[in-house]
Image (tube, coloured by chain):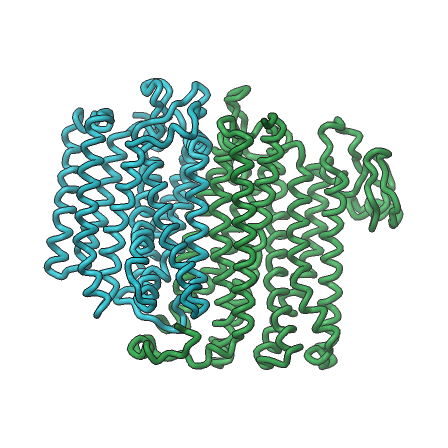
Chain colours: A cyan, B green
Amino acid sequence: MTFMNDLQFIWFSVFVVLVIGYTILDGFDLGVGMLHLFSKKDEERRLMLNAIGPVWDGNEVWLVTAGGALFAGFPDVYATLCSAFYIPIMILLTGLIFRAVAIEVRSKQPMSWWRWIWDLQFSFASFLIAFTLGIVVGNLIRGIPLGTDKEFTGQMGDLIDPYSLLTGVFAVSLFSMHGAIYILMKTEGELHDKLRKWINPSIIFFIISYATVTMATLIYMPHMAESIRERPFFFIIALINMLAIANIPREIQRGKDGRAFASSCINIIMLMALYAVGSYPNVVRAINDPAILSLTIFNSASSEKTLEILLLIAIIGIPLVVSYTFAIYWIFHGKVKLDTNSY
Amino acid sequence: MFSELNVEILARVQFAVTIMFHYIYPPLSIGLGLILVIIEALYLKTKDHFYLKMAKFWTKVFALTFALGVATGIVMEFEFGTNWATYSRYVGDVFGSALAAEGVFAFFLESGFLAILLFGWDRVGPKTHFFATLMVCLGAHFSAIWIIVANSWMQTPAGFHIVGDGMFARAEIVDFWAMVFNPSSVDRLLHSVIGAWLAGSFLVISVSAYYLLKSRHLDFAKSSLKIGVVVATVSCVLQVISGDSSAKGVAKNQPAKFAAFEGLFRTEAEVPLVLFGIVNTKEERIDYSISIPKLLSWMTFKDFSAEIKGLNNYPKADWPNTKAVFQTYHLMIYMWTIMFTLCIVSCYLWYTGRLFTTKWMLRGLVLSVLCPQIANQAGWVTAEMGRYPWIVQNHLRISEGLSKAVTANQILGSLLLFSFLYFLLFIVFLYLLNEKFKVGPESYTFGPAPYHQIGNQIGALPEELL
């Protein structure tokens, strides 16, 4: 490995960290959004909404920065992905806009029809974002047809197939469970007891879709398991993943919601790690000729000079970001309550 | 059913629609951010709850503009890749690091501390809260820095070299600081940020004037109006200096664009400054013009007989749309003139003690909120249309920057989708803004009750909170 390869690897890792940050943080926002309609009382809905109130906007920034990092470090990947996933990205953006508006607007009027409209929008937009993200990941795992000029050569319709629909459902189940645990952690009293009953179905939903996706991946996408077959060391990721998932119902049972949430975060990190290890060094797999046409972290990266600058930006910036993210979550820790500043 | 040409036009229209709509909000956030810092500093200094109420009110308005800025900004970020994939490959190495710096340094700072600014009133002390406000304001300004650096690089590229040829050609960084401080970035950054201060201060002025006219929240309105007028007056003065320096830079670095600003078809000496006129592209002259002889030569080169390059130095196919650029450029200047006049008159009335009671002036000030918005939009249209036919000046043409995998139908579809969405968003924005103004600052008087107390008596809260 040359210095350049190191840089490429490091910047790819930074990108993965940003994506993981987004998945963990906005993941529970999306989950809370999808669960929003299951509660019928306005006060409960407000409590759930305000559990993510101070942080959802900041969580979305992880996606923005991940996009910027991709553009900066791997412009070819950014350009190919954005133009190939044109329609999913438009759906994603629409979902993000609708969610933002719904959160801002819903509590501004007391009429129940008014709140219902925005609640429906909030919930449906959250679902749409989660499902679309899942479809995009499914396509990245399967691969998309690419030309020698690194451009997408397929049709938009090709992006929808049983496997990508399955990963879409999987993303929905993952975020629902994650969101349910988060909201359990942030509430108390009657709502808390009610939510406790939602946890089991959401865990079961997650485990069923996880098992199905894993089987489908091993059967239909054998390339994802190749690098772990070659380097058995990485099997540890799968093991930790299993343990983290198994720990969730255990901690919930014992009433340790914080630990359950931590396990859920580890679950997400391990899932992303499995994906990253499985597809490495490809970022966009070319289904038509994976060995030659795929966009790897090596053939699609920016110049050495740029990666060096980016490394410097990351070294200065990431500790700052992590420290004030922690500070802010610490300031808003504890059970959610409604006050004059609430949504 | 659509030809190649339509992809280009549709992609340009889409970018114009999304960026112009987006650009309503960030200037307001930047300008209001500055004003919030001023108000909270006054609160820290005087410990007067009056300023706390004021800060809370403007924070709510700030939050709204910020939320819409983020929602519409994400669209912009992905649009580079969706509609302009070839451009993204070409500039990624240069442009990307500015964008990544923006995400890491600006957005996180802004959105993170915004949580404290909005929801932390009763959770942190006033000093911590002031710090959070300062960070949000700083973050907002940082976000302007990086994106304008990136855009300025497209106007006056520097610090890079071209690698590869034909469709594989791309720009690679050789000198980061030369890229950051390219010939136009400082001028354009200052010009845009001051424009943002004008947007924020005139919003404050307009709302305060409205309350004064309606005789509501008088103390609040008087204080806000004073702060607004001070910020606006200072910004107006700074803006003319920055504008002058900016225009000189354009004349030097992008002469074709400058010629389009001024409607200058032929290279001439002793060029007059045209104040009004209609560009006649067929006859290549300006009709109905009112102008001051030799002044443009002097303003540009400090020499009444200096020669200024005209459009005739460039192939006609590469001319920017002079008709439009000339008008938007002048529109921006007219708007400045109006704002400056309003500021001077306001200061005079304030000095003579009549500012809060002069009805005709207050009515004018209510409408003044439109001036910086029009000026900001017109200025950007001028800057971007003036660069035609280049997406990266002298290196990459707009027509070469498009996505190859994207069809006209997809762009048309998403264009219609976003136009519709943004139309709805704008209505929601105006509605929410109006609600906040209707409620006014007084609603924040029953605070600041301790956080936990309010939580316990949730059933007994006033109705407007539920």
From the viewer's side, name the closer residue of A18 and A247.
Answer: A247
Position of B418 relative to B426 (above/below): above
Residue B84 x %, y % = 53, 33
Residue B293 falls left or right of residue B372 = right
Residue B328 falls left or right of residue A27 = right
Image mark count? 0
| Residue in view at x 28 percent, y 29 percent | A280
Residue B422 visible: yes
Q: Quarter of the image containing the N terminus of chain B? A: top right
Q: Quarter of the image containing the C terminus of chain B? A: bottom left
Position of A311 relative to A122 (above/below): above
**Picture quarter containing residue A11?**
top left
Residue A290 x %, y % = 32, 20
Residue B438 x %, y % = 55, 73
**Picture quarter containing residue B178?**
top right
Residue A187 x %, y % = 25, 65
From the viewer's side, name the closer residue of B427 and B404.
Answer: B427
| Residue in view at x 23 percent, y 51 percent | A177
| Residue in view at x 81 percent, y 38 percent | B264
From the viewer's side, name the closer residue of B54 and A112.
Answer: A112
Residue B173 visible: no
Residue A232 falls left or right of residue A64 = left
